[in-house]
Image (spheres, grey):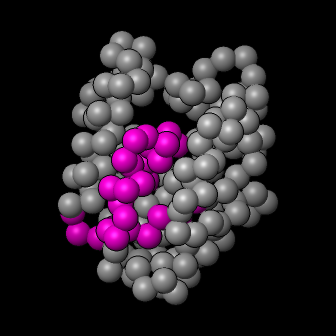
């Protein structure tokens, strides 16, 4: 068995789908952003504002390593994790990497109401999401598999991820 790591834009459904996949596989689900937020005692946007993105990425990288060292489960990093130097290489052979592919406008409509995403602070979340996709998609496309999330329920996406994990002998 290997870990299952879900990547994609903020608002792609990684956290929700991750919990559903973990439940279906009777595995743990590690939400990296939630762990960093809890340990730091403040939202990610505040960590970015007070300490900078580099400090946040260092915390994120450490939590990913801790999660990868644990027994196999579902790991959900933030949307920018995959685009960091060495991130994808760090999971190679240790995880099935699944890109939850979502259109920028869909991701923006899902992510914007939460208001805790530093990359989306500003006037036009859809425009910002398009920019994030341009910057990150080359990394996302290096995943072992892709699952389209537009016009699908989280349960349907989770079912597809579970089927992929089983067909790829990850679980």
**Residue 36 visible (yes or no):** no
Location of the C terminus (image quadrant): bottom left
**Left or right side of 105 for 100:** left
**Residue 93 visible (yes or no):** yes
Question: Is residue 80 shown above or below 21?
Answer: above
Location of the N terminus (image quadrant): bottom left
The front one of 112 and 96 is 96
Q: Which picture quadrant has residue 68?
A: bottom left
Q: Residue at x 69, y 60 (%)?
A: 149
**Left or right side of 85 for 122:** right
Q: Residue at x 58, y 32 (%)?
A: 114
> How many labels were placed on the picture?
0
Residue 24: % across, % down: 46, 76
Where are the magenta residues, as a range?
Answer: 70-99
Residue 27: % across, % down: 34, 71
Q: Which picture quadrant has residue 51?
A: top left
**Left or right side of 165 for 154:** right
Q: Is residue 73 magenta?
A: yes
Question: Is residue 90 shown above or below 131?
Answer: below
Q: Is residue 74 magenta?
A: yes
Furthest residue to the top?
50
Question: Is residue 169 shown above or below 40?
Answer: below
Residue 23: % across, % down: 43, 71
Question: Is residue 121 shown above or below 78?
Answer: above
Q: Residue at x 30, y 42 (%)?
A: 61
Residue 73: % across, % down: 34, 68
């Amino acid at each position: 068995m290997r870990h299952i790591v879900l990547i994609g834009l903020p608002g792609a459904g990684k956290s929700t789908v991750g919990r559903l996949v973990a439940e279906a596989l009777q595995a743990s689900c590690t939400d990296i952003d939630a762990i960093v937020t809890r340990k730091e005692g403040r939202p990610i946007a505040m960590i970015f504002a007070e300490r900078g993105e580099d400090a946040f990425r260092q915390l994120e990288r450490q939590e990913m390593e801790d999660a990868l060292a644990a027994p196999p489960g579902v790991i959900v990093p933030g949307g920018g994790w995959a685009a960091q130097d060495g991130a994808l290489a760090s999971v190679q052979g240790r995880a099935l990497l699944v890109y939850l592919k979502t259109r920028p406008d869909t991701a923006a409509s899902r992510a914007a109401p939460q208001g805790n995403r530093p990359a989306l602070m500003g006037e036009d979340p859809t425009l910002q999401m398009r920019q994030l996709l341009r910057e990150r998609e080359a990394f996302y496309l290096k995943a072992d598999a892709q699952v389209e999330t537009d016009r699908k329920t989280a349960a349907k996406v989770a079912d597809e991820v579970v089927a992929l994990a089983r067909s790829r002998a990850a679980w």
